[in-house]
């Protein structure tokens, strides 16, 4: 998606990734972005809000903070 791919295909793959990585903020963030690209605002907003509400894994604290910042930015600009 970020490199010109299909938003629908990206969403499909990210949804599959969530079955394995349920607590991965990056997957939720990118899924929200893929939903936005498909004009699925309700689903996108749910994913982005989920990122903000997640309890960060201490091993991935930096990545989590970056995802939260990006999710907040998207929510502020789009909703």
Image: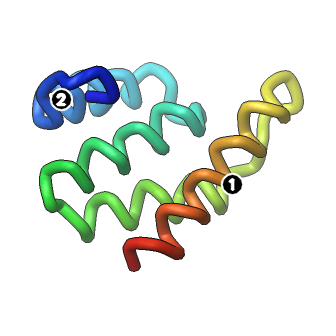
| Residue 34 percent coordinates (x, y) | 27, 42
- Which residue is at a point 41% across and 38% down the rendered structure image? 30
Residue 42: quadrant of the picture: bottom left
Task: Specify the quadrant that holds the C terminus.
Answer: bottom left
Asked whether, in this view, residue 52 is left or right of residue 16, the answer is: right
Does the CB distance between marks 1 and 2 fall below 8 Å? Answer: no
The quarter of the picture where the N terminus appears is: top left
Left or right: residue 64 versus residue 24 is right
**Label 2 crowd bin: few (<14), some (14–19), many (20+), radius 10 Å:** few
Secondary structure of residue under mark 2:
helix
Whole-percent x, y for residue 60 in the image: 79, 27
Sequence order check: which comes first, mark 1 or mark 2?
A: 2
Residue wearing tag 1: 69
Whether residue 59 is situated above or below residue 29 in the rendered picture: above
Identify the residue under disc 2: 12
Q: Residues within 10 Å of mark 1 (few under 14, many from 20)?
A: some
Q: Position of residue 35 (x, y in %)?
A: 24, 50
Q: Quick check: 25 left or right of 31?
A: right
Q: From the viewer's perspective, is residue 42 above or below residue 56?
A: below
* Above-or-below relation of 79 to 48: below
């Amino acid at each position: 998606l970020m490199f010109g791919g299909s938003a629908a295909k990206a969403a499909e793959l990210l949804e599959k990734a969530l079955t394995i990585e349920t607590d991965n903020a990056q997957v939720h963030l990118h899924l929200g972005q893929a939903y936005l690209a498909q004009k699925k605002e309700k689903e996108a907003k749910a994913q982005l809000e989920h990122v903000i509400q997640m309890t960060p894994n201490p091993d991935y604290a930096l990545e989590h903070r970056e995802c939260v910042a990006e999710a907040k930015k998207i929510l502020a600009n789009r909703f």
